[in-house]
């Protein structure tokens, strides 16, 4: 079991959530400086400077393309949201997938059926929303080109992130993460620790003709999630439940206001042991952090899934009355659609003309570099999008630019350039990164 070293185990009462800040990674530990969004942005910027200076053997950098990308994204936003009222980029958008561009508010329907719609139930809804969204995000790695999910509610066929989102929503609604008979809408460590690949396969309609990439990796993540929850009573309580994270965050809010960076830091240190130990620094696994010679210390963190999870917690927290501040601290998400958009518009151009012809591994320097350039590029594009739309960063934070936005524009340009709309190149995934 991958849990905290005994000396670093978070303190807190065994029968409650505790209050105040804790960290299983001490502030003076060398890993601490990498477990934040600021490190993502600064380390990626260092790699971008390296490429822009012509020192990279892998890519060239073409910032003159930013204006065209920003215009394309702005037009995509106007098409999708003519009133410019763009929601956050989060897992909740996938739960609304109905096919043919329609939206189905499954969450509202679920709350109505459970008699949880009134304002007096807003904190219960937040706990249940957290119970739902954390496992769903962990299950959100690329599905592969051949997987499909037939939605029982609409009989529509859903694919990719939308299909994964609805499949995980249905699994949750059936009590797939609950250890409490008669109380299906919860996610308990006791149940998560028992999930195996066959359970995921059944729920996600996997078959020989309907393969899902990274099946074992997804199940392993959920099991590790349960183990880490149980080892962290200060955040997840005893018995451990994901929804208890709401109580921890509320206890650390000041006048019901909480920083987005605090939420991310909490998730990075509390859930850090969930991720496979690829790069370990003095006994601490750094999760979605990789090696690159141009990065400070030779390491570049991305924390893609954890930042995606942070974005996905905004709505349940705000529904419960918390105000999340400092959204600008979070970065863009370096994955297929955002990074594919920038690649397709030739913001970064591979020096190897055969780059897109072969599948790559996540740890390859060329993929690490592409992801770093994506983080920097998204900041530049976001500024251009706001200028094109006449909006400020306060009115249109990166979380809305991504949703409106770069992710949708990445899918749009991919559909125009390649039959079926796949990303511009392939990356082998084990279900724990993208």
Image (cartoon, rainbow, N blue to C red):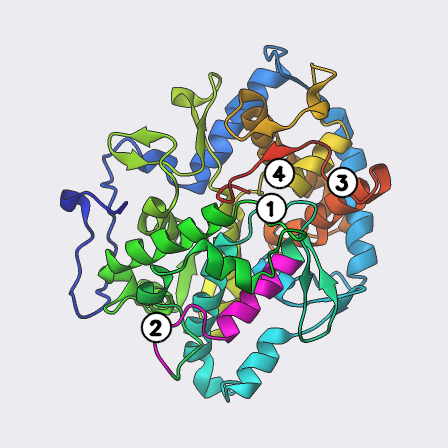
Q: Is residue 92 left or right of residue 221?
A: right
Question: Residue at 46% across / 54% down in the picture?
Answer: 197
Mark 4 vs 3, N-terminal side: 3
Q: Position of residue 293 (x, y in %)?
A: 46, 16
With 219 as the anchor, is 252 left or right in this view?
left
Q: Callout 3 environment at 10 Å: few (<14), some (14 to 19), or many (20+)?
A: many
Whole-number angstrom distance, CA of label 1 to CA of label 2: 28 Å
Q: Which residue is mark 3?
A: 70
Closer to the chain start, of discs 2 and 3, is 3
The Cα atoms of the two marked residues, 1 and 4, are separated by 24 Å
Q: Position of residue 187 (x, y in %)?
A: 39, 68
Residue 78 in the image: state x and y as whole percent. Answer: 81, 56
Note whether residue 92 is visible. Answer: no
Q: Which stretch appears magenta?
A: 163-181
- Residue highlighted by disc 2: 179
What label does residue 379 carry, if any?
Answer: 4
**Mark 1 Cα-neighbour bin, 10 Å: few <14, some 14–19, many ≥20:** many
Q: Are marks 3 and 1 in contact (CB under 8 Å)?
A: no
* Residue at position x 78%, y 34% in the image: 67
How far is the residue under mark 4 from the one under mark 2?
Answer: 42 Å
Alpha carbon separation for disc pair 2 and 3: 47 Å
């Amino acid at each position: 079991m991958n849990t905290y070293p005994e000396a670093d185990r978070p303190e807190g009462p065994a029968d409650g959530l505790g209050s105040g800040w804790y960290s299983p990674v001490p502030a003076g530990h060398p890993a601490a400086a990498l477990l934040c969004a600021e490190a993502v942005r600064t380390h990626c910027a260092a790699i971008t400077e390296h490429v822009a200076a012509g020192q990279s053997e892998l890519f060239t950098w073409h910032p003159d393309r930013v204006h065209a990308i920003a215009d394309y994204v702005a037009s995509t936003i106007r098409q999708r949201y003519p009133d410019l009222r763009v929601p956050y980029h989060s897992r909740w958008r996938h739960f609304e997938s109905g096919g043919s561009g329609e939206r189905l508010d499954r969450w509202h329907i679920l709350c109505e059926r459970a008699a949880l719609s009134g304002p007096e139930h807003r904190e219960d809804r937040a706990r249940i929303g957290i119970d739902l969204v954390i496992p769903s995000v962990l299950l959100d790695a690329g599905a592969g080109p051949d997987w499909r999910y037939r939605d029982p509610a609409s009989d529509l066929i859903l694919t990719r992130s939308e299909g994964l989102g609805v499949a995980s929503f249905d699994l949750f609604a059936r009590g797939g993460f609950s250890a409490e008979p008669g109380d299906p809408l919860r996610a308990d460590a006791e149940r998560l620790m028992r999930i195996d690949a066959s359970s995921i396969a059944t729920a996600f309609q996997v078959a020989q003709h309907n393969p899902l990439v990274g099946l074992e990796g997804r199940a392993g993540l959920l099991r590790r999630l349960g183990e880490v929850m149980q080892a962290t009573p200060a955040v997840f309580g005893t018995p451990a439940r994901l929804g208890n994270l709401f109580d921890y965050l509320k206890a650390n809010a000041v006048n019901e206001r909480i920083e987005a960076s605090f939420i991310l830091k909490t998730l990075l240190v509390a859930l850090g042991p969930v991720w496979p130990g690829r790069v370990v620094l003095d006994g601490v696994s750094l999760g979605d952090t990789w090696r690159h010679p141009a990065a400070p210390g030779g390491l570049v963190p991305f924390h893609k899934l954890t930042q995606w999870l942070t974005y996905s917690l905004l709505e349940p927290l705000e529904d419960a009355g918390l105000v999340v501040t400092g959204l600008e601290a979070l970065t863009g998400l370096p994955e297929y659609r955002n990074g594919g958009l920038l690649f397709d518009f030739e913001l970064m151009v591979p020096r190897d003309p055969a780059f897109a012809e072969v599948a790559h591994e996540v740890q390859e320097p060329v993929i690490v570099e592409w992801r770093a350039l994506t983080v920097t590029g998204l900041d530049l594009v976001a500024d251009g999008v706001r200028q094109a739309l006449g909006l400020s960063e306060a009115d249109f934070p990166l979380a809305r630019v991504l949703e409106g936005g770069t992710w949708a524009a990445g899918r749009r340009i991919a559909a125009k350039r390649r039959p079926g709309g796949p990303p511009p190149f392939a990356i082998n995934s084990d279900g724990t990164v993208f």
